[in-house]
Amino acid sequence: MQAVIIASGEGKRMSQKRKDSPKPLLKLLGLTLIERVILSLKQTGVVEEILIVVGYQGEKIKKALGGGEKYGVKINYIENPYWRRGNGISVVRAKNQIKGNFLLLMADHIFEYTIVNEIVREELNGYDAVLAVDTTPAEYLDVNDATKVKLESDKITQIGKHLEEYEGFDCGIFLCSPKVFDYLQEAISQGKESLTDGMQKIASIGRLKAFDIGEKFWIDIDTPSTLQEAQRILCHRIGKESDGFISRRLNRPISLIFTRYLVKTNLTPNSISLLSFALCVVAGMFFMGGSYFLIVIGGIITQLASILDGCDGEVARLKFKVSEYGGWFDALLDRYADAFVILGMVLGILKSKGGISPWIWGFVAISGSFTNSYSAAKYDLIRKFKKRKWRFGRDTRYFIIFLGALFNQLYFTLISLGVITNFISLRRMWVLRKD
Amino acid sequence: MQAVIIASGEGKRMSQKRKDSPKPLLKLLGLTLIERVILSLKQTGVVEEILIVVGYQGEKIKKALGGGEKYGVKINYIENPYWRRGNGISVVRAKNQIKGNFLLLMADHIFEYTIVNEIVREELNGYDAVLAVDTTPAEYLDVNDATKVKLESDKITQIGKHLEEYEGFDCGIFLCSPKVFDYLQEAISQGKESLTDGMQKIASIGRLKAFDIGEKFWIDIDTPSTLQEAQRILCHRIGKESDGFISRRLNRPISLIFTRYLVKTNLTPNSISLLSFALCVVAGMFFMGGSYFLIVIGGIITQLASILDGCDGEVARLKFKVSEYGGWFDALLDRYADAFVILGMVLGILKSKGGISPWIWGFVAISGSFTNSYSAAKYDLIRKFKKRKWRFGRDTRYFIIFLGALFNQLYFTLISLGVITNFISLRRMWVLRKD
């Protein structure tokens, strides 16, 4: 399917933020707005070609995005020299390049990509276009400024900014038949040049369908404050279902602060995994020192590594870089990191206490840590994953080490770790057996 | 769907083997023949009720199988006092209990359950029955004794033992419409009482369809030698695709010998996993002893545990007891077993060599072993699993330990293990990164 993205407007209300760039090139957590639209479309797996209608500072957009090679999509451009006029004209400019039904999107609307997957599954029969509609808008929607729709079951009867009665809001995502161009041209010839004007034509003859997006996320980025809001929401959405207590309450809030900076760099998620691993090696070396001062530093670095361990996934999710390899690589590095930290603890303990017991406890702790991680994935899978308030994972293990280091109780911490982790692994065997 | 199993005959040619039992209760690797048919049907997931037609020593069969509760299926019985006559009569006895299209099977035919899944997907339109046909029979098929079919594309034109020209063999698995009863009754009234006679009636009017089973396994167990053959084939079929070199060439052939005995006991696959784990703990304790004699015994026990580690899965597959939990439980126990063996080695080495290096190498080896197992599953998954001649897994690790113990080189073995396993984990990271 082809997708048309309207990226021709000036975005006056953003002039302060965007400085000398067009609005579609505004950065949001490391990616420009239009890159987010493009990568979302790529993620749907149904878009073969993206047509971008450019106008205001179009050259800059073309230069930034190129032919789409770096995103793994095919991008072509359409020039609209009349970008100062209504955005309906931008849509009509694409007419000659469109081969069938197509998607129509805005460069400044960020959205959950599954909305697109669902809208393309809608049947057009009897309708000329389908519009994604939000009937339960979030509190950050600027109701005065938003385009509203009046509904009769799933038919849109009116669309416009100034409706007195309305049931939903225009999310800026359309599935269109090529007939839409005719309506738009008709509207333009009557001096009604906005896309909304053209859509109102279709609505008035009962051929505009609404697709209710339900609870899915979308946001129209028109002002600096909506940009802020979008940043807040995207960050909020990337926490993981499987986060344990420490992750959720302590690590995640801090890692998200790091991540806001990390997304602006060129660091890949895998480099961040490596960085977190390196911190664990360093922490292990500090533990080895054996003095209270060094142990405290080791403890702090351990906790820092644990926090940073969340950033790789966050950056991956925010930058559309999630990969199976990335998750696997991170998990494997984490196991090595665990080994270095525990080995460091044992060697540190040996400075003040000889004998083989620290070693034995080291073996016990490493076995427990490994089997915890080893068993977790399948345990969740078999138990169909219930969201639990308390999940004992790597976040908790590292927090215990952090606390133990602060209180200069490395040996006691090692023993606790060994006892707790193995208890959990055995408990999992037992619980699943009963199931 | 309903399935009818014919279990009424005497099975004269098996009289020596079966002693005082009817043939369906003959044991094959821990399960009776009819239990294998029932459990295969259960595995298909499409059979709701099993009707067993009993005759010769029917009471014994009823007593052995009961209402099917222990197999998780519903079993009902149909008596056929005329079991000495042709087996077509046994089929007709089921007539009043059949509600629609049904499966018809023989109590002495063992088969790959997917044949049933595929035959029920066949369309009957224009046909009254479908017969599973083998056009590429294995070398153990007794051609003289087998029922043959003559084909015209997928239509069976003739069926019988004494066809001169034929293209395939009757596998004894039918999908029937209730009309089949009429044809059988007609044949019986003409003195033709075998199922084959009735089927010939359907074939002669062009309403018997052939379903080619391709390379799938089936065997008709009529004689003591086919029973032997079935045992050989079933054992051969339970080796795992993912077996490494040591597994395939050394462990598997031996574990299959154990398994032939183990299936006759009540030991569950999970108990066998526990037994293998216990052997590893014992092996670790022998290693701890530190003397050559004890180390050799430890090495032998390690290898024995490695062999026994294959038996749990073999027994599970042979007795239809494969479970997700079982695989997970075994894998988790294996990790603990690894820890005990390596800990034992370290403590054994310390008897003759002090210092911290044996401990460090113990840490290295345990980390490598864990990360090997941890990374293997996903590595195979991401690489879409290519069958490799050499796979370095637990079988190889334990074989190295076994050899190292025989040559009294525990320390060198520990170091080798640490180097090799970690090299493999790092290599996997590298290979997948390039992919």
Image (cartoon, coloured by chain):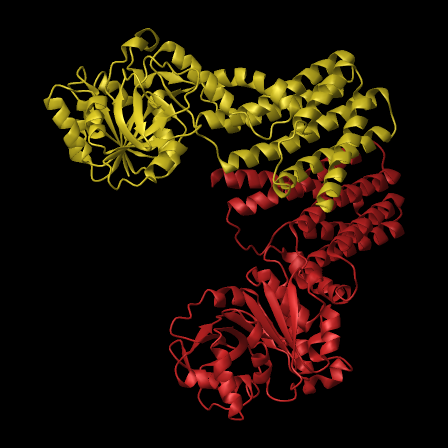
Chain colours: A red, B yellow
Q: Is residue B352 left or right of residue A30?
A: right
Q: Is residue B347 left or right of residue A169?
A: right
- Residue A47, above or below B323: below
The residue furthest top is B16
What percent of the width, then of the height, locates residue B165? 31, 19
Displayed quadrant of residue B320: top left
Viewer-side residue, B82 vs B218: B218
Viewer-side residue, A89 vs B375: A89
Q: Quadrant of the N terminus of chain B?
A: top left
Q: Is residue B203 left or right of residue A105?
A: left
What percent of the width, then of the height, locates residue B428? 72, 39
What percent of the width, then of the height, locates residue B324? 51, 37
Displayed quadrant of residue A234: bottom right
Task: Identify the residue shown where x is 79% and y is 47%.
Answer: A409
Res B241 seen here: yes
Viewer-side residue, A98 vs B230: A98
Task: Identify the residue shown where x is 68% and y is 15%.
Answer: B300
Q: Quadrant of the C terminus of chain B?
A: top right
Task: Identify the residue shown where x is 59% and y is 45%.
Answer: A377
Task: Identify the residue shown where x is 70% and y is 17%.
Answer: B298
What percent of the width, then of the height, locates residue A97? 58, 72
